[in-house]
Image: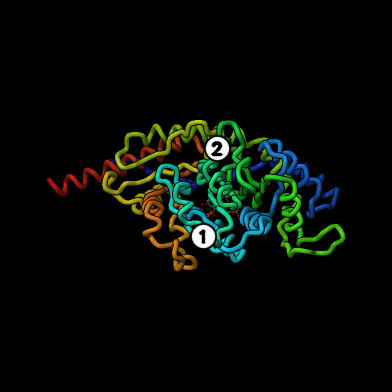
Amino acid sequence: MINNDGFSEPVYVTEPLLPDLAETYSMLEIIWQSRQLSNNGKMVQELERKLAAFLGTRYLSVFANGTNALQIACKTLDLSGEVITTPFTFAATANALAWNHLTPVFCDIEEATFNIDADRIESLITNKTTAILPVHVFGHPCEVEKIDRIAARHNLKVLYDGAHAFGVKIKDKPVGSYGDITMFSFHATKIFHTVEGGALIFRDQDLQQKAKCLRNFGLKEDYSVDEPGINGKLNELQAAVGILLLKEVEAEIAQRKYLTNLYRQVLADVPGITVSQEAEEITANYPYFVIRVDPTAYGISRDELYSRLLSFNIFCRKYFYPLCSNFKCFKGLPSSSADNLPTANKVAESVLALPLHGRMSASDVQKIGGIIREIKIKNKKQINEIFN
Ligand code: T4K
C-alpha cells in the first residue's frame, strides 16, 4: 500500500544555493560606494581570478549566461559550416550553433553515459565540418582524449559544453583542460551560480583576448571594431553573488554526493529503475540525479511515473526530452533521422531527473525513493489481480 502522503510543500528538481544575506548586503555596499555596476569592474575581475584558481586554469572569462558564452565561443573559434554535436542536451547547445548560422550534425550517444559516442564522430565528418561540440552530460566527462585525437586528425576545433561540469576532474586533471574552449553555465539551477551567468575556459591567451573583445561589442582599445561583437558582460552584482557562493560550493557538492549515494541505496533493487554508479577516476560534482525507467520491468512508463510523482508534490524533470533533433527547427536535418540516433531516442524516452540539491535532507531522499518503490509495488499487485 502506498501509505506515504507525499510532501506538504513542492519539492523541485533543484533549488538554488543562496549567499548569506548579511554578506550579500556588505558586498552591495562596496558596489554602491564604487558606483561601478558593470563593464569589467572589480567584482568581475575578482570573480574571474578566484574561479581560475578554483578550476585550475589560467585563462577564464565570465559571461552574461552560458548560452551567450557558447555563441561567443563559436565566433572566437571562427567556426563555419557544420558542427558535430549531441542531440541529448538542453536546447541551448544546438541553438547556439544555429544563431551562428552553423548547421548542427547530430551524433548518437553512448547508452552508459548519455554522452556523444566518440566512435561515431568520424563517420559524420564532411568537408564542411569545422568543429565538434560535445556536452559533458550531467557532469560526466566525455571521452575527451579520443575526441581531441579525432579533432587533431581532421584539423577540427573542439568546443566543450561543460554547462553541468563545474569542478569536475578526470584523473585529477580539470575537465576544462581539454579541447580549445570549455563553457560552464552559472545559471541559478547550477551547483555554482551567479543568478544568470557563464564562463569560458580557453586553451590559450589569444583565444581569451578575442572572446573578451567579442563580449564587449568587439570594441578595441581605440574604440574601433574589426569584428562585430555582442554584449556578453556579467554585471558587478551578479559577480558579487558568485564570489560569495564560491565559498559554499564544496559543501554543496559534498551534500549532493551524500544524497546521491543515498538515492543509489534506496533505489538499488527496484526492478525497472536504473541508477547511475560512481565513475572511476572522475572527481564528480553531482549536478543531477537521473534515473532510467524500463516500463516493462517497472510496470509504468517514465511519463506515468512523472505524473504520479506530481501528485506527491514531487516535481521531476525529463532532462533531456524531447531531443534537440526532434525540435521543429532541427527535425528536417538529415542527421536528425531516428535511424541515425537510435540510442539517443531510446534514452530520451526513459530518463527522469529526481530532486537533488543541498537543501534536501536524507529523509527527503528516503521518502522520494520510498514513493518510487511503493508506486512500483502497488502497480505490480494491480497487474497480478488482473491476471489471477
Ligand atoms: N548547455 C547545457 C547542457 C545546459 O544544460 C544549459 C542550461 C545550457 C547549455 C545553457 O546555459 P545557460 O544559458 O542557462 O546559462 C534549466 C536552466 O534554465 C538551464 O540553465 C539549464 N541548462 C537547464 C538544464 O535547466 P529549465 O527550463 O529546466 O528551468 P526551470 O525554470 O524549470 O527550473 C528548474 C527548477 O528549478 C524549477 O522547477 C524550480 C527551480 N528553480 C529554478 C529557478 C530558475 C528555483 O528554485 N529557482 C530559480 O530561480 O532550464
Q: Is residue 314 visible?
A: no
**As drawn, is 35 to the left or to the right of 181?**
right
**As drawn, is 379 to the left or to the right of 73?**
left
Above or below: residue 39 compared with residue 256: below
In this rendered view, identify the residue nearer to me: 360 or 198: 198
Residue 376: percent from the left, percent from the top?
29, 43
Of the residues under marks 1 and 2, which one precedes in the sequence?
1
Give amino acid for label 1. Thr
The quadrant holding residue 82 is bottom right
Residue carrying label 2: 285
Q: Is residue 215 visible?
A: yes
Residue carrying label 1: 126
Residue drawn at 37 percent across, 54 percent down = 342
Do the residues under discs 1 and 2 have CB atoms within 8 angstroms? no
Q: Residue furthest left?
A: 388
Give amino acid for label 2. Asn
Residue 116: percent from the left, percent from the top?
47, 49
Residue 97: percent from the left, percent from the top?
58, 61
Q: How far is disc 1 from disc 2 in space, using C-alphas?
A: 35 Å
